[in-house]
Amino acid sequence: MFPFFSLNSDVPLIRDAISEKLGTFFFCVAGFIAGYCISFTTAWKVGLVTLAGTPVLIITVALVGKALTMYSAKGQKVYAFAGTIAQEVLSSFFIFHSFFKIQKCNFLI
C-alpha cells in the first residue's frame, strides 16, 4: 500500500529544503574554492598541506551524509507506519463511538 498522505506532506518540505540549502551549498563551495585560491597565492606551502587533508575531509563528509540519508529514510518509514496505526485507531474509536450513540438512541426509543 502506497502512503499518499506522506507524498502530499513531503512536497512543501522538499521545496523549503531546496530553496534554503541549495543557495547555502553554492555559497560554501565558492568559499571553499576561493579559500584554496587565496591560500595558493599567498602561501603555497600551507595550501599544499591543506590540500593533502582534503580527501579525508571529503570522504568523511560523504560517509556522514550517506548515514544521515539512510537514517532519515528509516525514520520516515517508521513515522509513516505509526501514522497508519494512528489512523486505524482513530477510525475504530469513531466507529465505536457511533455504535454507542446508536445503542443509546435505540434505548431511548
Image (cartoon, rainbow, N blue to C red):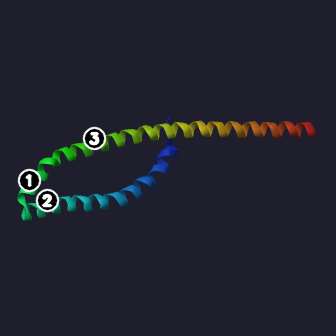
- Give whichever of discs 3 and 1 has the lower sequence position: 1
Residue that carries the numbered disc 3 in the rendered image:
63
Q: Amino acid at mark 1?
A: Leu
Give the vertical position of 80 relative to 10 (above or below).
above
Residue drawn at (21%, 47%) of the image: 57
Q: Secondary structure at mark 3?
A: helix
Question: Residue 63 at x, y = what percent?
Answer: 27, 41
Give the labeled residue for mark 1: 48
Residue at x 20%, y 58% (from the top left corner): 32
Q: Nearer the viewer, residue 23 or 109?
A: 23
Q: Identify the image quadrant of residue 62.
A: top left
The disc placed on residue 57 is none
Disc 1 is placed on an element classified as helix
- In the picture, the disc for residue 36 is 2
Q: Residue at x 72, y 37 (%)?
A: 95
Q: Are discs 2 and 1 less than 8 Å apart at CB?
A: no
> Which numbered disc, 3 or 1, marks the residue closer to the eye?
1
C-alpha separation, residue under disc 2 versus residue under disc 1: 9 Å
**Label 2 amino acid?**
Tyr
Give amino acid for label 3.
Answer: Leu
First of labels 2, 1 by sequence position: 2
Where residue 41 appears, x then y in whole percent?
7, 64
Whether residue 3 is visible: yes
